[in-house]
Image (cartoon, rainbow, N blue to C red):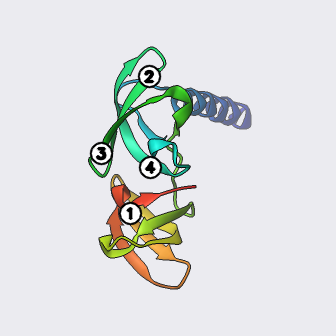
Amino acid sequence: MFRFAAGIITAAMLSVGAGAASAQTTGDWVLGNYKGAGYWFPGVIDKVSGEKITIRYDDGDRETVSRGDIRPYDWMIGSKVECNFKNAGEWYPGRIASLAGEKIGIAYDDGDKENTRTGRCRAK
């Protein structure tokens, strides 16, 4: 009986998670393909108007894009990202080591580590 109930709860959680991941409504945290350049930056949907979505990126920039230029925010510990190391303008690859809202810890591929903000990171 317990295994069956746990299976139902797990299935229900996956169902809710899948629905939330595909949601594209005001307030959703998403990744946007900033200026169509192929890099995905984190931000929050500020406005939805038909097929156009305005994103307020975590770094403060704002952009209106088509639905095809956003995807669900899927960053988690272990995700590969590139970050602007020490906000000096150079982007380096690494993995997310810790994540708490917009605070993010990065373990760079070259061995360096940094605590920074999601607005200084992007994904391919």
The kind of residue tagged 1 is Ile
The kind of residue tagged 2 is Lys
At x 26% / y 47%, what residue is drawn? 60
- Number of other residues with Cα within 10 Å of mark 1, as a class: few under 14, some 14 to 19, many 20 or more: many
Percent position of residue 34, x then y: 45, 45
Q: CA distance from mark 1 to mark 4?
A: 14 Å
Is 101 situated left or right of 66 in this image? left
- Number of other residues with Cα within 10 Å of mark 3, as a class: few under 14, some 14 to 19, many 20 or more: few
Q: Where is 94 relative to 112, above or below?
A: above
Label 3 element class: loop
In the figure, residue 30 lies in which quadrant? Answer: top left
Q: Which one is earlier in the sequence, the residue at label 3 or at label 4?
A: 4
Foreground residue, 56 or 28? 56
In the figure, residue 7 lies in which quadrant? Answer: top right
Q: Which one is earlier in the sequence, the residue at label 2 or at label 3?
A: 2
Which is more foreground, mark 2 or mark 4?
2
Percent position of residue 105, x then y: 40, 69
The kind of residue tagged 4 is Phe
Which is more foreground, mark 3 or mark 4?
3
Percent position of residue 28, x then y: 40, 32
The kind of residue tagged 3 is Asp
At x 36% / y 61%, what residue is drawn? 120
Q: Where is 3 relative to 41, above or below?
A: above
Which is more foreground, mark 1 or mark 4?
4
Q: Which mark is residue 52?
A: 2
Dots 1, 4 in contact, CB < 8 A: no
Percent position of residue 26, x then y: 35, 25
Q: Quadrant of the C terminus?
A: bottom right
- Looking at this view, name the residue that lies furthest to the top: 50
Q: Which residue is mark 4?
A: 41
Q: Which residue is mark 1?
A: 104
Q: Which one is earlier in the sequence, the residue at label 2 or at label 1?
A: 2
